[in-house]
Image (spheres, rainbow, N blue to C red):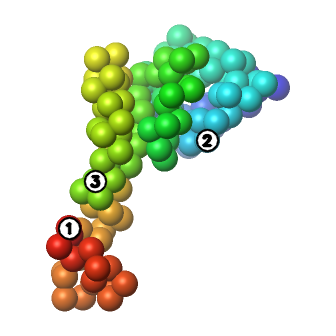
Amino acid sequence: DISSWVQQSVDGILNRLQIFQLYGLLLHRPDQLLSSTGEELYQSLNLMKKQGLVKKIGISIYSPTELDALCKQFSFDLIQAPFNVLDRSLEKSGWLDQLKKLGVEIHGRSVFLQGLLLMNPLTRPAYFERWQPLL
């Protein structure tokens, strides 16, 4: 029962955090929405929003190509995607502009390449030497 699972998951998070509302609820496997139970999952997420338990619903993606299929069927308030000096695929694909026009909030992740950009270049592992000019 997907609806009960979503409700129990959200209730559990709210109880553990001792808050009344989540700012955002993201699916970290958005391909679940394209499965046979995808519509039910999406409706369950929206129900959490309608009940005021969640302010925004969205997905976490790895590639903008995931948005091609998902955004034809579903609308989101929030998208989390990798965005940094080496990975600007969200911008290059045109999705960054599209999402902005749709009013979708975008959360960039790995902006510092999981700390790589903040490391002292002299102590950075040798493996990354070939990217030194970019870093």
Q: Which mark is residue 84?
A: 3
Q: Which residue is mark 1?
A: 134
The answer to whether residue 86 is above or below residue 115 is above
Q: Give the spatial CA distance, label 1 vs label 3.
A: 11 Å
Q: CA distance from mark 3 to mark 2?
A: 21 Å
Q: Residues within 10 Å of mark 2 (few under 14, many from 20)?
A: few
61 sits to left or right of 103 = right
Mark 3 near mark 2, Cβ–Cβ under 8 Å? no
What numbered label is drawn on residue 109?
none
Horizontally, is 2 left or right of 48 in the view?
A: right
Secondary structure beneath disc 3? Answer: loop
Can residue 6 be seen here? The reply is no
Q: Amino acid at mark 1?
A: Leu
Disc 1, SS: loop
Measured as percent of width and height from the top left, residue 128 is found at: 32, 79
91 left or right of 37 in image: left
> In terms of sequence position, does the residue under pointer 1 or pointer 3 come before the other?
3
Where's residue 69, x and y in %? 57, 26
Reading the chain from its start, which is encountered first: label 3 or label 2?
A: 2
Residue visible at 64% across and 36% down in the picture: 31
Out of 42 and 20, give the one closest to the viewer.
42
* Marks 1/2: CA–CA distance: 30 Å
* Residue 86 in sight in this render: yes
Within-10-Å neighbours for mark 3: few <14, some 14–19, many 20+: some
Residue lying furthest top in this view? 50
Say if 51 sits above or below 9 in the image: above
Q: Nearer the viewer, mark 3 or mark 2?
A: 3
- The picture places residue 121, in percent across and down from the top left corner, at 19, 82
Which residue is identified by label 2?
29
Residue at 78% x, 25% y is 36
